[in-house]
Image (cartoon, helix red, strand yellow):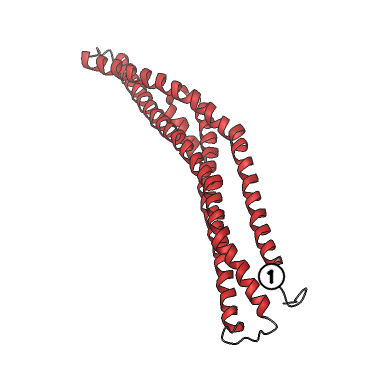
Amino acid sequence: MSGIFHSIKKSIGNKGDARPDLEFVDAKARFDQYQDTLIKLKGNVANYLSHATSLFVASLQISQDFATLIEDPEREALNEYTDTSVSMRQEHQGLAHEQVPKLQHSFSTTLLSEIDAECVRNSELAKRVQRRIEVFSEMGYYQKKVNELREERTARANKGKTESASDADKFERNQKKLAESEVMFHEINSKLLQDLRELWNVERIARMGPLLQRFLAHERKFAELYTQALAQVKDKTAFVTP
């Protein structure tokens, strides 16, 4: 980190005030953390949905395997586990065939799509961040160039040499470029810093809090569906210890 700060101070040149860019470094670090974690969250939510779906499907497949092993359609006589096997299979069919599509749709529309939308909003902010970095670098370049040309002018003057028209034009041209880049930088930087702070200090909680609540509601719904289905299975005994 000290290397970054040194580079920032050096690029600013004789002005020596690195504070504005140190504020940006901090704001950008928080923004990067927010965006990177959003992408990670999307992957984890997608994995959760995939595993939840796999659980329903695997449970159905297991119930079908037990049905093959326990139920015998060629014999009229039922064994003591037939009712349990039949009801277990039926309940898991309901979960896999009816609830899985609903679960997938709900996750996609209320969680994954919201995360995608937030990432898209942040991508526009990321473009502004990148542009600000480019303009800051350009400003540092012209500041360094002007400083070097000013030192050359001073050295010539100390030696009693007359400045040529091309040297004077070169100095004025770079001074103009520096002034233009400074104006552009300040126009971009002020609003960008404000928006980055607003995102982290206010909008982050306003957007992620409700998303957390929706995910929790999905988890509860998932557990409720599974518990209700298992409660409908006609078990041979009230409770069977594994």
Q: Amino acid at mark 1?
A: Val
Q: Residue furthest right?
A: 238
Image location (x, y in percent) of residue 217: 65, 49
Given the current orientation, which residue lies at the most extreme front position? 76
Task: Describe the element under mark 1 as helix, strand or loop.
Answer: loop
Instruction: Examine the rendered structure and indicate whether residue 143 appears above or below residue 25.
Output: above
Q: Is residue 122 left or right of residue 167?
A: right
One can see residue 44 in this view: no
Please tell me how crowded label 1 is: few (under 14), some (14-19), or many (20+) other residues with Cα within 10 Å: some
Does residue 92 appear in this view? yes
Quadrant containing the C terminus in the rendered view: bottom right
**Which image quadrant for residue 11?**
top left
Residue closer to the observer: 82 or 174: 82
Between 216 and 68, the residue placed more toward the observer is 68
In the rendered structure, the answer to whether residue 93 lies left or right of residue 167 reads right
Residue found 34% across the figure and 17% down from its top: 175
Picture quadrant of residue 99? bottom right
Above/below status of 105 relative to 237: above
Report the side of 216 relative to 162 (left or right).
right
Q: Residue at x 53, y 59 (%)?
A: 50
Residue 128 location in percent, x, y? 43, 31
Q: Which residue is mark 1?
A: 233
Query: Vertically, is 58 above or below 187?
Result: below
Compared to residue 78, the image places residue 109 above or below, namely: above
| Depth check, front residue: 76 or 11 | 76
Q: Position of residue 151 (x, y in %)?
A: 35, 21
